[in-house]
Each structure stands twice: as C-alpha cells, then as structure tokens.
Image (cartoon, rainbow, N blue to C red):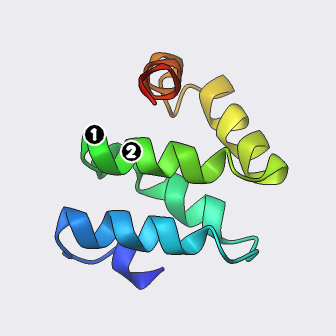
Amino acid sequence: MSLLTDDSPDPIKIAALSALGYFTDDHIPDAVLDRFSTRSARSRARSIELLCSRPSWALKLAESIDRKTIPAEIVSRTLSSG
C-alpha cells in the first residue's frame, strides 16, 4: 500500500491497485479513497474497479459518493467506458 502514497510513477500505482485486489485487508479501501482525488484519471478508474470488486469496499465507495468526497459522475463515466 505504500506505493499508493509515494511518488511512484502512475503505471506502478495502477499495478499496485491491481495487486491489492488479491488481499482482504480492511484498510485497503480507506487507503485507496484517501488519495483518490490526487490520482490520474487512469489510476482513479482502476481505484473504482478495485473498490467495486468487494461488497464492503463498494459500500465505502458509495458512502464517499454520498458524502460528496468523490463525484458521482466519475463513477458512472468509469463504469460505462469499460
């Protein structure tokens, strides 16, 4: 998870986000959501895919959208482009 918070290049962050899908740590969705707004469009899209991969993580994403910390339109745009 440290690759999500350091100055790693975007492809490294995207690979790290992909790898996190294999783990069940409850801290993962929080770490992903904490830095969501600072990520590139590709990294944000991968973050949303990751968060949607588990019901409890998707709930955290939905709660972030409800609190307006993540814009709802970015989620629908991401899901419809895949």
Total labels drawn: 2
The residue pinned by badge 1 equals 41
Q: Residue furthest front?
A: 82
On the image, the x and y values in percent for residue 63 come to 72, 35
The residue nearer to you, when weighing 70 against 75, is: 75
Q: Residue at x 23, y 65 (%)?
A: 11
Q: Are marks 2 and 1 in contact (CB under 8 Å)?
A: yes
Q: CA distance from mark 2 to mark 1?
A: 5 Å
The residue pinned by badge 2 equals 44
Q: Looking at the picture, does residue 12 appear above or below residue 57?
A: below
Q: Residue at x 73, y 43 (%)?
A: 58
Helix, strand, or loop for circle 2? helix
Q: Is residue 81 left or right of residue 19?
A: left
On the image, the x and y values in percent for residue 5 come to 35, 73
The image's mark for residue 63 is: none
Amino acid beneath label 2: Arg
Q: Looking at the picture, does residue 44 appear above or below residue 13?
A: above
Q: Quadrant of residue 3?
A: bottom left
Q: Is residue 81 left or right of residue 8?
A: right
Q: Is residue 3 left or right of residue 20?
A: left
Amino acid beneath label 1: Ala
Q: Residue at x 52, y 34 (%)?
A: 69
Helix, strand, or loop for circle 1? helix
Crowdedness near tag 2: few (<14), some (14–19) or many (≥20) residues, C-alpha within 10 Å: many
Q: Residue furthest bottom?
A: 2
Crowdedness near tag 1: few (<14), some (14–19) or many (≥20) residues, C-alpha within 10 Å: some
Q: Residue at x 53, y 52 (%)?
A: 33
